[in-house]
Image (cartoon, helix red, strand yellow):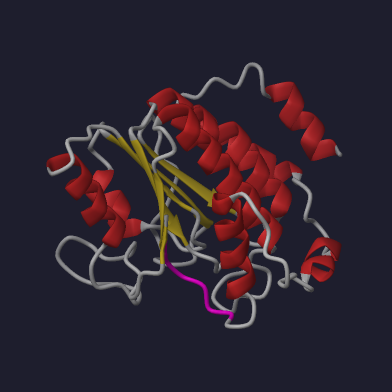
Amino acid sequence: AYCLVRPPGHHAEPDRGMGFCIFNNVAIATRYAQAVRGLKRVAVIDYDVHHGNGSETAFKNDPDVLFISLHQDNNYPVGRGEILDGNETCINVPLHAGSGDGAYRAAFKHVVVPAIDRFKPELILVSSGFDASFVDPLGQMMLSSDTFRHMAHELREAAERHCQGKIIFCHEGGYSKEYVPFCGLAVVEELLGRRADEAFDDELDEAHSRGYQALQPHQLMLIRQVAKAARLDLRSADAEVLGEAEA
């Protein structure tokens, strides 16, 4: 399911609202799933360009919730979202400004998906923000709708492996009124398993032509640092990741 929730929620702390957010929608949904629906293990994946600080506060010390935030380092809130050494269920991926498709795909391949597979959730919730797009005014990342499609594909596949396809996307940020619809459409198309007949992202060529879309060495170093901090096994990935960075 894709929930067009407004206002967004992932910045809201237990005792106060922050950053356009009043209530933390994903945190409330997680606790409802556990308390009312009887689920134990819930994964929350947040790819909004801003750190999901409220969600981190809610789940940082809860071994029954896997929280992963992929965000632009030190954007908002300033001073939150650092790598957490030794925490296997609360994982921050503070990507450098200017990260593109290659960095996000590598982070998914070598951090997000392995962490989900290790955790084996009974439900996956996604804080789905589109402000990491290459035209968003509140971020400095370079993603196109293709990258959001890829992330949705990987998450849907993980849900099929572990929780009978139970996955819910909750809309978060995204401030380009011209481009957010294409990113949202890509995610919904991936969930439905089919493409819309009359909608096409005509900005893809521009996004793909921007320099440094491929995985860069400094991005690789950060992804490996995150994986090590989260105690993920990198032995089989080291050579492959090195090849990606050199390509």
Residue at left offset 21%, top offset 55%: 28
**Which of the image's four quarters has the C terminus?**
top right
State whether the magenta stretch is mostly helix, strand or loop.
loop
**Residue 151 versus residue 241 in the image, above or below:** below
Q: Is residue 219 above or below residue 240?
A: below
Q: In which quadrant of the rendered image does the N terminus lie?
A: bottom left
Q: Nearer the viewer, residue 105 or 194?
A: 194
Where is residue 168? Give x, y as percent. Answer: 39, 51
Residue 235 visible at all: yes
Find residue 206 and report its image quarter.
bottom right
Which residues make up the magenta segment?
A: 171-176
Residue shown at the point (86%, 64%) measured from the top left: 209
Instruction: Give the farthest residue toward the front.
Output: 197
Does the magenta portion include 202?
Answer: no
Query: On the picture, is 139 further left or further right than 41?
Result: right
Q: Residue 234: horizontal and vertical position, in percent?
A: 60, 22
In depth, the one of 217 and 197 nearer the eye is 197
Q: Residue at x 75, y 70 (%)?
A: 200
Q: What count of labels does the image hold?
A: 0
Q: Position of residue 237 (x, y in %)?
A: 67, 23
Give the residue drawn at x 53%, y 78%.
175
Q: In which quadrant of the rendered view does residue 65 lie?
A: top left
Left or right: residue 187 compared with residue 42: right
As drawn, 203 above or below 121: below
Q: Position of residue 94 (x, y in %)?
A: 52, 51
Q: Is residue 143 visible?
A: no
Please identify the residue farthest to the top as the structure is shown. Answer: 235
